[in-house]
């Protein structure tokens, strides 16, 4: 299995499907999601809930080979973060090989719209995702990363 195939599988088995119910509470206050297949291990560690910061790492045979750092927040405290994060999970389940970082370029469902802009490829990239509710920006996340060697 190659890195891209594993990463796509791991993303579908991580936050996009499990959300917070399968995470491990860490001693330092962080939360961790893990997924392992063969020689690869994926872990997503984050701190906070609004705002939040985190890092996704992929290890091959115990050595880090890929990483992503991210920082995000729900912009309007009166909005239900739960609804925003449920829609985010829906969008993240649509991850594709051409853009294996977060969700698709765009996704809509009723009053909700997800947008993601990224530059680069699996080796080195950065991007920003946004969620709109009734055309009003309610969430933003910035991310960057790439292969580790």
Image: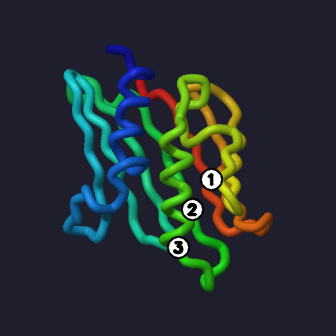
Residue 72: numbered disc: 2
User: For the residues marked 2 and 3, what is the alpha-carbon distance in whole angstroms?
Assistant: 12 Å
Which label's residue is closer to the chain start, 1 or 2? Answer: 2
- Whether residue 123 can be seen here: no
| Figure disc tally | 3
Residue 136, picture quadrant: bottom right
Residue 121, picture quadrant: top right
SS at circle 2? strand
Residue, x 60% and y 24% (percent of image)? Answer: 98
Between 102 and 88, the one nearer to me in the picture: 88
Quarter in which the N terminus is drawn: top left
Answer yes or no: do the residues labelled 2 and 3 have beta carbons within 8 Å? no
Rendered position, 132 above or below 78: above
- Whether residue 96 can be seen here: yes
- Please rate how many residues cluster around mark 1, counting C-alpha atoms within 10 Å: few if below 14, some from 14 to 19, many from 20: some
Q: Residue 120 location, x and y as percent?
A: 66, 28
Circle 3 is placed at which residue position? 81
Please give left or right for residue 114 compared with residue 146 in the image: right
Which label's residue is closer to the chain start, 2 or 3? Answer: 2
Quarter in which the C terminus is drawn: top left
Rendered position, 64 above or below 111: above
Residue, x 71% and y 62% (percent of image)? Answer: 111
Q: Residue furthest bottom?
A: 78
* Disc nearest the viewer among 3 and 1: 3
Q: Residue 144 location, x and y as percent?
A: 58, 43
Answer yes or no: do the residues labelled 1 and 2 have beta carbons within 8 Å? yes
Q: Residue 86 location, x and y as percent?
A: 49, 61
Between 135 and 3, the one nearer to me in the picture: 135
* Disc nearest the viewer among 2 and 3: 3
Residue, x 44% and y 22% (percent of image)? Answer: 4
Circle 1 is placed at which residue position? 142
Between 73 and 131, the one nearer to me in the picture: 131
């Amino acid at each position: 299995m190659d890195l891209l195939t594993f990463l796509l599988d791991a993303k579908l088995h991580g936050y996009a499907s499990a959300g917070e119910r399968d995470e491990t509470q860490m001693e330092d206050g962080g939360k961790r999601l893990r997924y392992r297949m063969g020689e690869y291990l994926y872990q997503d560690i984050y701190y906070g809930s609004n705002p939040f910061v985190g890092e996704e790492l992929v290890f091959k045979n115990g050595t880090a080979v890929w990483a992503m750092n991210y920082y995000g927040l729900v912009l309007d405290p009166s909005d239900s973060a739960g609804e925003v994060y449920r829609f985010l999970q829906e969008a993240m389940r649509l991850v594709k090989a051409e853009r294996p970082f977060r969700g698709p370029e765009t996704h809509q469902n009723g009053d909700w719209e997800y947008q993601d802009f990224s530059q680069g490829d699996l080796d080195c990239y950065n991007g920003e995702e946004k969620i709109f509710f009734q055309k009003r920006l309610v969430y933003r996340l910035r991310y960057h990363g790439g292969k580790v060697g």
